[in-house]
Image (spheres, rainbow, N blue to C red):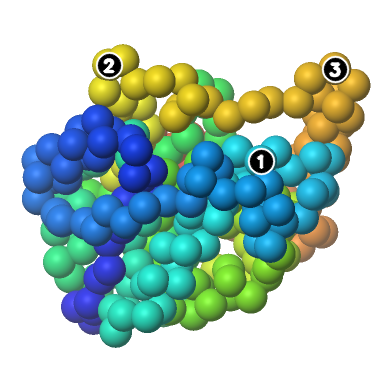
């Protein structure tokens, strides 16, 4: 399966420095992408956000900045479905990209038959581990394993057309984009798709030009009682896996694993942990 690929970078029209920075990163990686204006809160009334998102979600208030980012991804999925492409690569505008990605996108014969969504990013949390299936295909020195737990971050992933339709079908959005995509415990859309993880990852965040305004990189976080209520709700969703997931873990079909980023694939894949 070669498959035609639509690639888009989520980037605000006013974030010209980040766009130039990403254009250089893409050129180094050997791929091209479209830069179309992301949803900008400064250009829309607050009511516009509520045409796409709910005011609250599973763990409390849905912050406007998170809404705007989620809508930006939504618009990219819609543009993808307007093309004839079979696959859609979404990147955010602050990532490092492995040069290996060009070979992965040139021939998608590695795409699992049952997959709707493949996460190619690692989350930067130092102690982050995710639940991955023990068995699965390998490709170009990296593994592809089905993902069974939350793995936040929406800076790098690939959707097929069915995956994009499923993500769009679960509107209005109730959680931020990374949770909508990759948090099975909080997102019906994430439960409705089959998701795989590339390990080591092909993309990681942190590639930002110097002097970027904080307003472009930071979103408002809850404070006070709202913050602690959110932590409690999130804590519950961290353990609220279906019984089938616990059984897979206890029988050894899935295991905890770290997902590092690797600019070049090594000979060995990161080990799963028991």
In the figure, residue 263 lies in which quadrant? Answer: top left
Q: Residue at x 71, y 53 (%)?
A: 47
Q: Badge 1 is on which residue?
A: 64
Q: Residue at x 31, y 25 (%)?
A: 208
Label 1 residue SS: helix
Label 2 residue SS: loop
Q: Nearer the viewer, residue 23 or 145?
A: 23
How far apart, in angstroms, are the residues tagged by discs 1 and 2? 25 Å
Q: Badge 3 is on which residue?
A: 224
Is the N terminus in the top left, top right, bottom left or bottom right quadrant? bottom left
Left or right, residue 143 beside residue 148 = left
Mark closer to the chain start, 1 or 2? 1
- Residue 254 in view in this figure: no
Say few, some or many: other residues with alpha carbon within 10 Å of mark 1 (under 14 / 14 to 19 / 20 or more): some
Residue 245, image x and y in percent? 72, 57
Q: Badge 2 is on which residue?
A: 210
Label of residue 108 in the image: none
């Amino acid at each position: 399966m070669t498959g035609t690929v639509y690639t888009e970078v989520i980037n605000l029209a006013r974030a010209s420095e980040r766009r130039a920075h990403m254009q250089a990163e893409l050129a180094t990686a050997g791929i091209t992408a479209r830069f179309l204006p992301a949803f900008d809160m400064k250009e829309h009334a607050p009511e516009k956000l509520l045409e796409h998102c709910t005011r609250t979600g599973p763990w409390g208030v849905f912050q406007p900045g998170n809404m705007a980012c989620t809508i930006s991804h939504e618009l990219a999925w819609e543009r993808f479905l307007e093309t004839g492409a079979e696959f859609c690569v979404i990147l955010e505008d602050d990532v490092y990209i492995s040069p290996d990605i060009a070979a992965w996108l040139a021939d998608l014969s590695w795409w699992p038959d049952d997959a709707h969504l493949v996460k190619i990013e690692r989350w930067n949390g130092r102690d982050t581990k995710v639940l991955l299936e023990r068995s699965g295909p390998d490709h170009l020195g990296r593994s592809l394993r089905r993902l069974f737990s939350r793995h936040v971050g929406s800076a790098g992933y690939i959707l097929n057309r069915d995956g994009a339709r499923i993500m769009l079908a679960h509107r209005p959005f109730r959680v931020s984009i990374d949770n909508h995509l990759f948090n099975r415990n909080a997102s019906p859309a994430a439960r409705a798709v089959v998701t795989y993880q590339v390990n080591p990852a092909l993309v990681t965040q942190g590639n930002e030009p110097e002097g970027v305004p904080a307003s472009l990189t930071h979103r408002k976080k809850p404070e006070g009682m709202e913050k602690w209520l959110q932590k409690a709700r999130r804590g519950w969703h961290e353990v609220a896996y279906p019984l089938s997931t616990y059984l897979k873990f206890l029988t050894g079909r899935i295991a905890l694993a770290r997902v590092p980023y690797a600019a070049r694939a090594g000979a060995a894949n990161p080990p799963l942990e028991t």
